[in-house]
Amino acid sequence: MAGEESTILLEALEGLTLEDFQEFKKKLPHTDIKGGWNIGRDELEKVTHPSSLISYMGDSYGEGAAMDIAISLFEEMNQRDLAEKILDEKVKEYKQKYTEHVAREFLQYKEANSCLGENLSVRDRYTNLTIARKSWDQHGDEPGDVSSDTVTTQTLFEPSKDGQVPLITVLVGASGMGKTMTIRKVMMEWVEGTLCTQFDYVFCIDCKELSFSKEVSMVDLISKCCPQQRMPAGRILGNPEKILFIFDSFEALGLPLAQPKDELSTDPTEAKPLETTLLSLLRRTVLPESSVLIATRPAALQSLGQCLEGKHYVEILGFSPAAREEYFHRYFGNDNKADVAFRFTRGNEVLYSLCVIPVMSWTVCTVLERELYERNQLLACSKTTTQMIMFYLSWLMKHRVSNAWQNLQQFLHKLCSLAADGIWKHKVLFEEKEIEDQGLNQPQLLSLFLNEKGLEKGTDHVNVYSFSHLHLQELFAAMFYVLEDQDGMVSDSRILAKDVNMLLESYHTSRMDLNVTVRLLFGLVNPKSVEYAGEGIGCRISLQPREDLLRWLQTRPRGTSHPREVMKIEDLDTFHLLFETNEKSFVQSVLGSFTGIALQDVKLTLYDQAALCFCIKQWAGLLSVTLRSCSFHQQHHRQEPAKGLPRQSWQQEELHSPLHPLCQALGHPGSSLQSLRYGPAPVCTSTGWVAALPACCRAVGQSVPLSCRLQWCGLTEGDSGALGTLLATLPSLVHLELGDGALGDDGVRMLCAGLRQPGCQLRVLRLRYTHLTSACCQDLAVALGTSTCLEELDLSFSAGLRDDGVKLLCEGLQHSGCQLRALRLGSCSLTGACCQALVAWLRHSHGLKCLDLSDTELGAGATLLLQHLRHHSCTLQTLGLSTSTLSKDALQELAALRALKPSLKITDLLEHEAPETGAMARLTFQRSVWAGRGAAVRGRKGLPSSRAAPPHSRSLC
């Protein structure tokens, strides 16, 4: 023997007189030993020292038994003080060992998806749940409802508002709401000494492991918590107020909680049928001073309420919004991965809402973790909302109490009928009679999917039921339309007709609340979902409705006002419906009827982008993409990529570029894209946009001219270097528009450095509202002189440009290589002093077709300009001029010019584009016309050109 126990026993034996020591040895051979053997008398006669005797006892009886025998013999010898001393040390030693045992059992655990041998820490994973204290006549709130008095694990055993400390606490929660994890948290904090410090012992009993085949006592139940350890039952049970009993999965017992009181036990050592022993504890006939925590599903709540004397119970309502995000971070243990996964989930209203259920959060994290491992990003996520919910249902099936599979399938058919009927009738609460009429009154199965709620109806108290989450009701409603009827099922005229077309038509015409049901219906006809339904929950799904769904999407009204216009998809919902099917052939069949995308005023979450990109990659006939006033959810920049992911791909995909995923999809090998229009620009930081552009252009490819419009984005000088590099290295970028940015003169200089590079193929540069001054015009002039591609320069609304800036520009414009065909200088605070320079340039330029000087007071300079325009060598076709400010002489020149050149269009071309107060500007996107057409398009007057752009580039000018 060793340790504190042997030391105490040695001190006790050494304190005996020689006579008492001999008496102790004499009694040893007569001790009744279980599982050991007695020391022979001959051997005992040889033992003369207490230490030798202790050694013999340890070898023969075992350490624990040796201590028990010593205590028993000391009591027989009337050495009670020694017996008490040894017993105190034994209890102390046992408590330490039991605490260590609890730590091993509860501080770590395995999840269903954990690797072989991998243990997870409760401390690292547990996330605070919303737990509400309620009275017995109030239960069944929706997950996430925090209207009741909330508690935490720290306050679970504290006095309630009425000052009472409950001896019995019932913790209620539907399957997957975190009851077992909460118990683990309680056990962990008790071990660490931060919770339940009033208890010397906390015994946790898993009711699923209890056997009904034999009688048990309370001592037997306690011993189940202490495997392979001898328990000092007398000392432990002698202080019942220091004991907390925890019963997990109490509903698994299915006990009748009504027995005559005279049948109950009062002795903790008395063995009786399991239900009698447990009811004795609950009815306080045995160990009445002890405390009890019962974790159960709602199925057992009503019978418990009739059995117990307390006024309150506590119910787990799930994760709050903040807790959902915290759980993602705890699950991934990596901020980058957690951020990306949470953003993806947050952008999916259905998934995010369902994540109030802890096991649904676990399901989503498990799926997304695998997606990140396999693909390094989530925008190509292969798992849909429907499939993730199916994973959750499969988990529920594995944790059901009943093993009657056939009954389960019949039950699910009836459950789907109830769900669909409720969705059609805007009904989420079902009375008990409706449950019985549907044949759903099977408590163990019902509690998996429905919550029970007590309501006062007049003077009566009635029970009503609701699905544990509205989106689960919507999934079962969708399943109603695709489940194959089981053999032998009797037709019922009261059951809703399975008319998929009626559902789709109602959704399209008037019932927008059917959106989630319809979306999940599309997801259910995916072959993977069919497989999950068969293997996970044993339901056969029919693929027959696929043809109805395909036909409906192909024939929905299209976004076109003229037969010659492209057939456009103008709602994001279509992409989500197709994404839920997650089947390429189905998606291609639908999209073959359309040739364009036109979205407006849409905030694209990461999940929206995944749906959009998935569809674009299957869309060989996509010709045009128009996004107006759309914004992309953007990831905040982090310094380090997620662990295990390539730095380059992670930063491109998740950290820098909100547009990169879309452009990557647009650049798929089979793309026929001709027109990409984006404007006004999304609400995001300009740095993200600048970083997005290279990936965007590379993805679309050099054969597709790209137009980039960044308006009201808050661009800064710091972005200009990247833009300059962009212009120099990406020949596919032909149209760049920057507006409402504080680029400053230094920013323009860096931009011009890119314009001067041979690789720059930019045709249109618009720097409207960019606060330029004349200080940057020298650089612009050099760029104009070296660029052989730039055809339009727009510096409108640059009040700091002034006459000096125009004079510098004209120096560059006179270069022989300059190909400029349109120059816009409207509202730039110009005067007549700049007209001499403009006239000198016009004498040398025969390619300029449009000059915009609107909103300027040129004075006498206007007369000089108009006189030159009468010259036969001047080929100008459009002049922007504010005629209301012209002098009498200038008006006479204007009249003469019009008479001489009737084809010359002279008018005010300026269109103000100031943003709305307090919001992003809602600007008309297309403000120029296709070169050579001369027709007005969306607000700006036509600018004729002698050089028609190729068809694939006309959307970019």
Image (cartoon, rainbow, N blue to C red):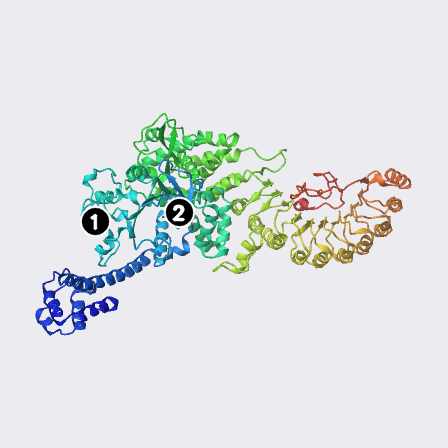
Amino acid type assigned to the residue bearing label 2 in the image:
Val
Snapshot quadrant of residue 883: top right
SS label for mark 1 = loop
Q: Which of 70 and 598 is in front in this view?
A: 70
Q: Residue furthest top?
A: 493
Asked whether residue 787 appears in the rendered view, the answer is yes
Amino acid type assigned to the residue bearing label 1 in the image:
Pro
Please state the horizontal and vertical placement of residue 108, each as a whole percent of the image: 35, 57
**What is the number of callouts on the image?**
2
Q: Nearer the viewer, residue 740 or 289?
A: 289
Q: In the image, which disc is placed on residue 682?
A: none
In three-dimensional space, the C-alpha distance between marks 1 and 2, rounded to whole angstroms, equals 37 Å
Name the residue beneath numbered marker 2: 359
Asked whether residue 203 appears in the rendered view, the answer is no
Snapshot quadrant of residue 805: bottom right
Residue 828 appears left or right of 354: right
- Image height check: is 762 above or below 431? below
- Image height check: is 564 above or below 716? above
Q: In which quarter of the image is the N terminus?
A: bottom left
| Mark with earlier residue (1, 2) | 1
User: Pointer 2: residues within 10 angstroms few (<14), some, or many (20+)?
Assistant: some
Q: Nearer the viewer, residue 880 or 467?
A: 467
Q: In the image, which disc is placed on residue 268?
A: 1
Between circles 1 and 2, the one closer to the viewer is 1
Please state the horizontal and vertical placement of residue 56, each as a whole percent of the image: 16, 70
